[in-house]
Amino acid sequence: MEQQRETAAFGMWLFLVTEIMFFGGMFCAYLVYRVSYFDAFVAGSQKMNITLGALNTAVLICSSVTMVLGVHAAKTNRRRATVLFLLLTIMLGLVFLGIKAVEYHEHWIAGEFPGPNFHFDGPDPRHTQLFFSLYFAMTGLHALHMIIGICVVGTIAYFAWKGHYSSEFHTPVEITGLYWHFVDVVWIYLFPLLYLISHKH
Amino acid sequence: MATTVQPVEQQNYLNSNYGIKSWLLTTDHKRIGLLYLMSITLFFFLGGFFAMLIRLELLTPASDLMQSDNYNKVFTMHGIIMVFLFLIPSIPAVLGNFLVPLMVGAKDLAFPKINLASWYLFMLGGVVALYGMVTGGVDTGWTFYTPFSTTYSNTNVVTVAIGVFITGFSSIFTGLNIMVTVHRMRAPGMTWGRLPLFIWSHYATSVIMVLGTPVIAITLLLVALERLFHIGIFNSQLGGDPLLFQHLFWFYSHPAVYIMILPSMAVISEIVACYSRKRIFGYNFVALASVAIAVFGFLVWAHHMFVAGISVYAAMIFSLLSFLVAIPSAVKVFNWTATLYKGSVHFDTPMLYAFGFIGLFTIGGLTGLFLASIGIDVHVHDTYFVVAHFHYIMVGGAVMGYLGGLHFWWPKISGRLYPEGWAKLSALLIFVGFNVTFFPQFLLGYLGMPRRYAAYPEEFQVLNVLSTAGASILAVGYVLPMIYFVWSLRYGKIAGPNPWNAAGLEWRTSSPPPTYNFEETPIVTWEAYNYDEISEEKGVEVAG
């Protein structure tokens, strides 16, 4: 049983490595373009809503805490607590997506979505548009990972409620936790790179 | 053939259950390997059909069989099918799936359900890509270069890109499964130093699959997003840069060449040792060369972009790094050759393929050095020289290894022997046909015939006719094994557990193996390729 658990965890870690490479392509593009078109990226970055971004960071960190508590509850045979913490995690994930949707809406209204309707008053609007292309691609893909994560945590919560997990067998809860933390960590990198890096004091 | 025939029909993975559900819902790695075998054989002949269309069009200088736009679609579909739907899954997903657990002495791969899921993802991706091809095709070349793919092409780029994206995940799952299995499922006593080189090579392949595939996945996703939502990461009108696409694309697609060739090298190491009746020369070097190829493979991608506008310094560094790949590749070739020395060499069919591989891979690899040197690359860039070079690696190397492996382990897979005479004939036809097809293309490219055109000047016709004639021989060579393999399933001689008297755990269980591979978990106390001990133990000379 212990060997199975370690094997599963090892598999999940490897999968997370592939996820790092998946996001890595875009992080790489962002860094290269930011160096090349510095002023345009600063101008774009200053259009970010730092308050909502910070709030979302806090929400995600809290969701990681509830996830850890959920895993711990599963390990210690507390079925109701496991379900409760997993549901809290889902709720915080949904709050994150809601706030993200508000932000997207603001950018959309301001004409900051790339494409024919893009509109921006600044030093280099063409490359600021590139900033927003990357912003939407990176946060959009992150949001997609959140949605997948919420579905998985939901499934795990259902099985927890059915009593599938115990101190002997809780591997699915644990590796789902790994995935959830990974998605959080991606945001921990996205937030400073997109929001904070060009913040005026 | 010195074989021990077992007339008693025993319980094995093939006859344990017959229903269609027992195949479609199986989690047995051996059955999933066979599912892959059937699927990629289908894709191989489909891709081969497009290849024949290309060769037929190029019989005459004028573009008469097809117009340019159709020709563009045909070579694109040939490339996409052969690369993503045949070559990448070929050895890892068929032979790797079948053999990795057997060779390390495990009951199955680490994640049997994920293994099955990988086959379904592969089929889904294949069907989506084929759907895109049937409903209008795609004409970007298999490389999907921007800005053509994102802005100008009017074909089904998004559908096909999504198909390739999905098959990418099947490849990630296969790689992940193999890596975890090699780390955690080895039988007692099966240390890293005792692993067959097949495993080392597959491990290196899996590293590339796990690290590289996500990068092309995100790249193709961004291409699709650019077409659908007009974001502009690669579009210079929106501030992006098409060159970034090439960097990201080749960051995967160059290592992908090693996804195709490393497993082939895995097969060749097993075959050369078995038919020389010797421990492989320089085991440690061959094993580490696999890992070195995987590592260097990630550092050479920009040699595809020497004329695309990268800086001179970058080009020089990438040129130098590309030359470095030659070192581990040569280490392997020299070690295989040294294994033959004073070995008791047998010319059975798998060994013929191995010889074919070594020769053709050497030509392909050396012409790769031509292309890695900047001056020559500028001269032959986008000509048939490049086409010939990568076909020597991908067909002469990868497919020869695949067929050699299929012959070598066919008795294990099916429990039956293939007809040796026919098999030797097909190996010969493939070798001759291959060289007649692709050697003229080196000349054509050096003389300046560009790739990807339906029409060409008349002075190139003789060599093109030669190439098409070779392709016809090659086609016969490829159809033959399919016929006699199917024939042997029913009429072939019963193989017995170890018809070649080979080393390796997979030969210590019955053929076909039982569902959980071994009656009892083997305990390994010997090194890989202990052929000197095997010959003493059995006291028989293996037939040649």
Image: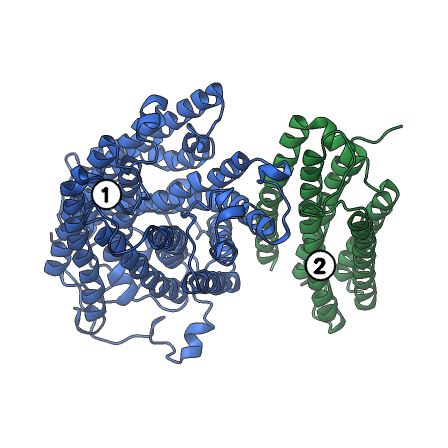
Residue at the farthest bottom position? B19
Q: Position of residue A114 (x, y in %)?
A: 69, 45
For label 1, the residue is B357
Q: Is residue A59 left or right of residue B5?
A: right
**Residue type indicated by callout 2:** Ile
| Residue B526 visible somewhere in the drawing | no
Answer few, some or many: residues within 10 Å of disc 1's Cα (few below 14, many 20 plus, some between 14 and 19): many
The total of numbered circles placed on residues is 2
The residues tagged by marks 1 and 2 sit, at their Cα atoms, a distance apart of: 47 Å
The disc label shown at residue B346, or none: none
Chain drawn blue in the picture: B
Going 58% across and 47% down the picture, which residue do you hit?
B222
**Is A97 on the left or on the right of A178, as rendered?**
right
Co-location on one chain, circles 1 and 2: no
Colour of chain A, in one word, is green
- In the rendered structure, the residue with mark 2 lies on which chain? A
**Viewer-side residue, B81 vs B34:** B81
**Which sits in the foreground, A101 or B382?**
B382
- Figure check: B267 above or below B50: above
Expressed as whole percent of the image width and height from the top left, the position of residue B424 reads 13, 54
Label 1 sits on a secondary structure element that is helix
Residue name at image x 73 percent, y 41 percent:
A190
For the residues labelled 1 and 2, say whether their Cβ atoms are less than 8 Å apart. no
In the image, residue B161 lies at what x, y percent?
A: 50, 54
Question: Which of the 4 image quarters holds residue A186?
Answer: top right
**Residue at position x 28%, y 57% in the image:** B48
Colour option used:
by chain
Please report, as a chain letter, where disc 1 is located. Answer: B
Circle 2 residue: A147
Type of the residue with mark 1:
Phe
Front-most of B466 and B455? B455
